[in-house]
Image (cartoon, rainbow, N blue to C red):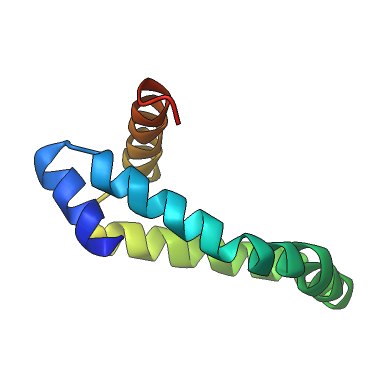
């Protein structure tokens, strides 16, 4: 997907990226179900008392990564919107 994403960013052609994303989703669906229905529930029960600290640290990490990349959250949200439109247009 990394190569497909690079191609998309340079060419604007999303066909290969969308295909690779579909394969990825199919591959990890079962794994994600286990995380969502087992692991995350266990983690939430154990982390309730530190959730504010975790949220703050995650926000700081995100801000740092975005700054390093010279991008904004809005930039990536726009990319996601564009890909969503491309998927819709391809009838997927």
Q: Residue at x 57, y 64 (%)?
A: 28
Q: Quadrant of residue 53?
A: bottom right
Q: On the image, which quarter does residue 83 sit in?
A: top left
Quadrant in the rendering for residue 46: bottom right
Could you tell me which quadrant the C terminus lies in? top left
Q: Is residue 70 something one can see in this rendering? A: no
Q: Residue 26 location in percent, x, y? A: 54, 56
Q: x and y percent of residue 70 in the render?
A: 22, 54
Q: Indicate the position of residue 7 as horizontal and vertical percent values.
A: 15, 50
Residue at image position (38%, 25%) is 85
Towards the viewer: 33 or 43: 33
41 on left or right of 56: right
Above/below status of 66 relative to 10: below
The residue drawn where x is 35% and y is 44% is: 18
Q: Residue furthest toward the top?
A: 89
Quarter placement of the N terminus: bottom left
**Residue, far right:** 45
Residue 6 is at least partly visible in this image: yes
In percent of width and height, residue 31 lies at: 65, 69
Q: Return the residue nearer the eye: 54 or 90.
A: 90
How many numbered marks appear? 0
* Residue at x-position 19% and y-position 45%: 8
Toward the bottom, the furthest residue is 46
Compared across the picture, whether 10 is left or right of 25 comes to left
Q: Going by the image, does 62 lie left or right of 48?
A: left
């Amino acid at each position: 997907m990394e190569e497909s994403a690079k191609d998309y960013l340079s060419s604007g052609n999303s066909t290969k990226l969308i295909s690779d994303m579909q394969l990825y989703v199919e591959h990890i669906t079962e794994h994600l179900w286990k995380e969502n229905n087992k692991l995350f529930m266990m983690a939430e029960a154990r982390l309730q008392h530190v959730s504010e600290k975790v949220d703050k640290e995650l926000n700081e990490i995100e801000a740092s990564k975005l700054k390093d990349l010279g991008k904004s959250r809005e930039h990536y949200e726009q990319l996601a919107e564009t890909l969503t439109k491309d998927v819709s247009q391809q009838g997927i």
